Image (cartoon, grey):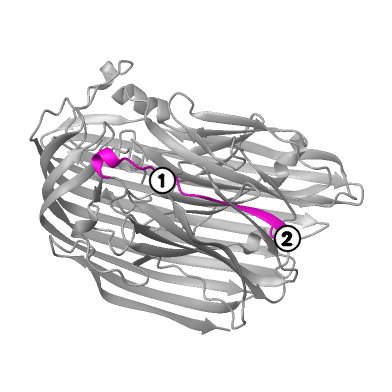
Amino acid sequence: MKWLLLLFLIGFTILPLASWGQPIHYSRGLLFNVTTSRDLVGYDPKYYSFEAFSIHPPNVTPIRVVLAKNITIGATGLTPIVRKVDIPKGNYSLILLNISINETNGTQFDRAAYVFVNGVPVFWGSTQEILNSTAESDLTLFENLLQGNVTFQIVIPNFIDKAIGITGIYKVNATLYLYPGPRPQGLPNQFIPLFLNSLNYSYIVLNPTHPSYSESLNIPNGTYRDLLLLYEEGGGNDEFWYTNEPATRSILVRYDSLLAGVVNPYETIYTGGIDLFAWKPLTSINTLSFHTPYLMELTPLLALGLHPTLSLTVSNLQEAKVLTGSNAFDWDLAGVLLLWVNSSNPLMSANFTRAMGSFMDSSPIFQPGFSGTYYQENGHYSIEYASVLKFLHGSESSAVTQRGTFEAFQQFNTYFQYAQLDENFYESSSDTGMYNASMIIEGSFPITFNFVAFETPITSPTVIPFNATYVQNGTITLGLSYYSQYIFGKYNATTIIHENETSIGGFAGVLEIINQYGGAVLVSLTSNNALTTKSLIAYYLINGGGYEQSFLAQGLQNSTSNTSGYLIHLQNSYTTIN
């Protein structure tokens, strides 16, 4: 996504395990994160790119709050666009945030796109590097944060480099839609943004030198429920981490010294990644807007006290540095503690009735073969906590179970790589006593990658930037199965998403490689062909009623002069469920 990117995929040799402990300096991989001149782009429809998953709003007129209108994002870096707005008083059954972005003024790479409210992350996505895009996020969970005068921070870390023709700017429109109706039950009423940076929003970057981060917390007395929401994405050499060795990444969360939970990252592919034409106009899953959030129940861990140290660690970062000698394996993280607080009913005592957490990773296993090197790695985790929380008025029993697995396999040689990764996770939690609530989140994130690529330098590859003729061809298949059920008293919100996408094709031409991480500019294009198919079936239910969404689309690339591509099929429908 950022233009300082690399895939260590092809064109390197794995040393035997006996050589571990010494840096292994691979040659640069043969797949790139590429941008293309706007001279090759064709038409500009109203919304060139969009996500398949979209919440169908109720049949009421929403209140519109405009946060940004054609705001220009130039060489802003991480500096936020700050907008202070007044949220109209009222009860809302649904709150949606729409982010629509237009790229103009020349060539640009795809960029991250974040939105924060008073430092709290509420939107996590990216831009389309050409033309325009639209995406949305469900902010209903943050209804008690969106009260009165609030500060929105819009962050698109854009960079300009006129020397290599990277001059594109983004224009952003952001609108909040408030749908009047019964407020959902059991919403959090206090929010603690985590890892606040100097710009006053939640954001940190971890890498092999700093693979962990710790923060001391002060949780208000009277807190009777505590959930953690994390957003994440790989960057630098780890933008396509599932093609690296090691190919697995897990985000381990510790509450004081105890393993509190594990987050499985999604294998997001941004719109310049791997085959830059494959995602134009049909983007990959969880790209423009991340729509499968993971809520981690921490309530039983209140038994450790109200002033814990929360720690995050991204696994296999240091192992990646040992194998490559590079420190440029980055992970961007943002998070918030969602709290339910009754300050007039303080916590008096708490005790664990069950406490167990384990995490296992096999570490990379390499084996030479007739057609190349074989790599595999797998692991699993299991976490269980239960406690009794005694308040001044009443008590609560809280329990949570998490478990998950991950498994990676690769076969590769100088020109070819086959990679497969599958992640599965499950969480179940229940709270009974003064109030009754439960939550189930489970999912599966499979991806299969099969590519051949060739590169022939035209100028000296030891001097960056340099030019090279380049050709690649292959197939990417990825999926998403996600189930979320949230119950508070008699209120029941359920979301089910089954999403699949396959892209097959390739391109050839001349690239200008602009940095050691695999960022590249397409100088000329000699062939271009890609067919991308995305399908989705989703259910969005409140107390058993709602709708089913059915989506099917195909995008085609078959031109060297009009590389914007076009949709050859689009079907999207909603069916009411009572």
What separation in Å lies between label 2 and label 1 (alpha carbons)?
30 Å
User: Disc 2 residue type?
Assistant: Gln
Say which residue appears at 27% left-offset and 76% top-offset: 569
Say which residue appears at 26% left-offset and 31% top-offset: 516
Q: Is residue 156 magenta?
A: yes
In this rendering, the answer to whether 135 lies above or below 525 is below
Horizontal and vertical percent for residue 567?
Answer: 26, 72
Q: Nearer the viewer, residue 48 or 426?
A: 48
Q: Is residue 565 magenta?
A: no
Q: In what element is the residue under mark 2?
A: loop
Numbered disc total? 2
In this rendering, the answer to whether 467 lies above or below 340 is above
The quadrant where residue 470 appears = top left
The residue where tag 2 is placed is: 147
Q: Which residues are magenta?
A: 143-165
Left or right of 102 on screen, residue 259: right
User: Disc 1 residue type?
Assistant: Asn
The disc placed on residue 206 is none
